[in-house]
Amino acid sequence: MQMQMAMNIQLTPFISNPRQGQLLNLNFPNKHSTLTCCAIRNSDLKLSQTQRLVHHFNPKTPIEEAVTPPTSWYTHPSFFHLELDRVFYRGWQVVGSTEQIKDPRDYFTGRLGDVEYVVCRDDSGIVRAFHNVCRHHASLLAYGSGKKSCFVCPYHGWTYGFNGALLKATRISGMRNFNVNDFGLLPMKVATWGPFVLLNLEKENLSKKEVDSHNVSKEWLGSSSEILSTNGVDSSLSYVCRREYTIECNWKVFCDNYLDGGYHVPYAHKGLASGLKLDSYSITMFERVSIQSCEGSSEKNKGNYDRLGRKAIYAFVYPNFMINRYGPWMDTNLVVPLGPNKCQVIFDYYLEHSLKDDKDFIEKSLQDSEKVQVKSIGFTGLIKSSSCNIPTFGCCMSR
Ligand code: FES
């Protein structure tokens, strides 16, 4: 079996034991070992150089005079690592949907920057998250998503419960001073808001009880949370499906495209534009959220009219999550950075409960949505392939 090691996590297995003054066996971890992101350390070394790139852009430039940030922000590998460190390893980040962990023993895995994680629901129904790294020798522990009775490491068979406890360590009977309680999975801070699952790498050492949902709402969405809740962004919708796209562009290019929605839609998405009253487009800014809203068109474009309804809300949540609520639909777009020139966009579709069995409506709506996405992806791909040092006016025009 091919073993995929979690190279991004350092287990420090071959270190001096402070209690016994001797080297530990390479194959057994020290209970004091800490999981540290090498990427964070490495990026620290490059930060001063990279921080110079930051100053190439003045965020205080008035919007009327603004241009896009410099090309290096979209292409430079060290800037990408700076973003992981300063943006994605801080604050709440969406990683999935509660649908993926609907029942006890459901789980899903993922990677945020260089950090592997597993999110699960334990036997008591509590949502938990851990570094997806075996405490023995740092193999990736779980893969993909689904349901399991426990996590068995594919390398040497150490077995963990859904509460993170080490249940079984194979062939350790000769080991002295080994206590299974010292080698449970390392927890991460996890929370849910509506149908969304969030991780916070900054607070990974806090215990579960310290997660206060009100604080999560405040920290993640600020004062926009109430507006989103009262406009139908909630857990009452039925989950329909997921679509994933891997795009050869910097993650911010996709976000830029989203944020200039009202500007490019009349030209790039004529079908969508016919279902919207674009002259009603408005943008409201909050601390970490921008909400674009637009009324539905009364034109007799029946398919789009039904799909888009009378009002559409497009919420961009810093740094990489978008919530689109229109008609009976809600879809979300999570832009996962995979490298300076690559990202994955995950679309989750939700529908009002009364329509969840209307297969024709669902299929037609998904086809219409797919057309919009494919076109946008085409444009973001073009932007990526034409990355060069030409200053661009950017997408700061209001609409
Ligand atoms: S790495 Fe050995 S059991 Fe997991």
Image (cartoon, rainbow, N blue to C red):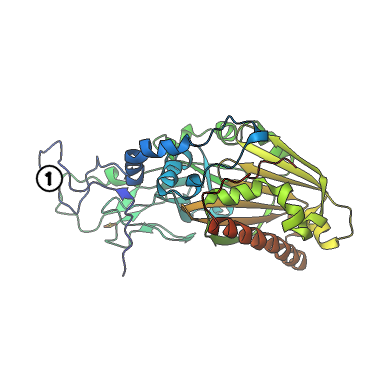
Left or right: 110 as drawn, with respect to 359: left
Q: Hey, what amino acid is under mark 1?
A: Leu
Depth check, front residue: 316 or 68: 68
**Mark 1 within 8 Å of ligand 1, using the beta carbon:** no
Residue 237, compared with residue 225, is above or below; it is below
In the rendered image, residue 90, in percent from the top left (x then y), is placed at 46, 37
In the rendered image, residue 289, in percent from the top left (x then y), is placed at 63, 37
Q: What is the quadrant of the N terminus in the image?
A: bottom left
Depth check, front residue: 337 or 263: 263
- Is residue 98 visible to us here? no
Q: Quadrant of residue 20?
A: top left
Secondary element under disc 1, as helix, strand or loop, is loop
Left or right: 303 as drawn, with respect to 263: right
Q: Residue at x 51, y 39 (%)?
A: 92
Q: What is the quadrant of the C terminus in the image?
A: top right
- Is residue 385 visible to us here? yes
Left or right: 202 as drawn, with respect to 14: right
In the rendered image, residue 269, in percent from the top left (x then y), is placed at 74, 58
Question: Mark 1 sits on what residue?
Answer: 23
Q: Residue at x 65, y 35 (%)?
A: 65
Crowd band around label 1 with a 10 angstrom C-alpha radius: few (<14), some (14–19), many (20+): few
Q: Quadrant of residue 288?
A: top right
Depth check, front residue: 196 or 165: 196
